[in-house]
Amino acid sequence: MTDLSSPATERTLESALVEVMGMRLSTATILFHSAVAERLGLNATDMKCYTLLRQFGPLTAGELAERTGLTTGAITGVIDRLERAGLAQRKRDPDDRRCVVVELVHDPERERAIDQLYAPLGQAISQLVRDYTPAQRAAILDFITRATTILEQETRRLRQMDHASA
């Protein structure tokens, strides 16, 4: 039987986790979201902007650009595509009529259709989670939360490097 606490085994497990998280999971995630986007006539970037609007509510084009790292010109194209798809609309900011915000279009039928694209994945992940004990789930949640924070920090670091060299 293998000693899971040996230094060699710990290094092997660490390498495997880094590879799975850094390559395989991230690639599978991007490809999945691309497939969902294609079903809606969009691309993965458009869908992630849609997700940001679902997560944070109405945002200005500048805020979307800042959160995604895209130029304001590229964000204009994203917003145009989201509008054509019936997912978002531009509206005047009620607090500052000079400012335009992008908000989601409330369409329960469309939202249900989008949710149905994600439902099988959500069900499969829920089943997977049930395979673990509550203590293991807590450890997994902690790991994923902390890994997400690291990814967000590294994204900001890379974008700041871009601005520093410009």
Image: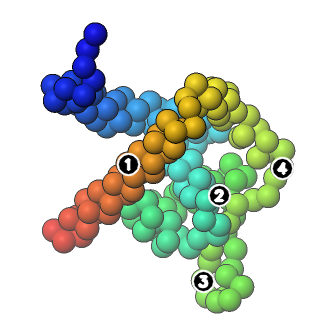
In the image, which is nearer the foreground, mark 1 or mark 2?
1
- Relative to 40, residue 1 above or below: above
Residue 112, percent from left and from top: 79, 42
What is the count of numbered marks? 4
Q: CA distance from mark 4 to mark 2?
A: 14 Å
Please give the residue where the numbered disc 4 appears in the rendered image.
108
In the drawing, what numbered circle is on residue 99? Answer: 3
- Decide: marks 1, 3 in contact (CB < 8 A)? no
The three-letter amino acid code for the residue at tag 4 is Pro
Q: Is residue 99 left or right of residue 105?
A: left
Please give the residue where the numbered disc 1 appears in the rendered image.
147
Local SS, label 3 = strand
The three-letter amino acid code for the residue at tag 3 is Cys
Residue 2, percent from left and from top: 26, 14
Please give the residue where the numbered disc 2 appears in the rendered image.
54
In the image, which is nearer the foreground, mark 1 or mark 3?
1
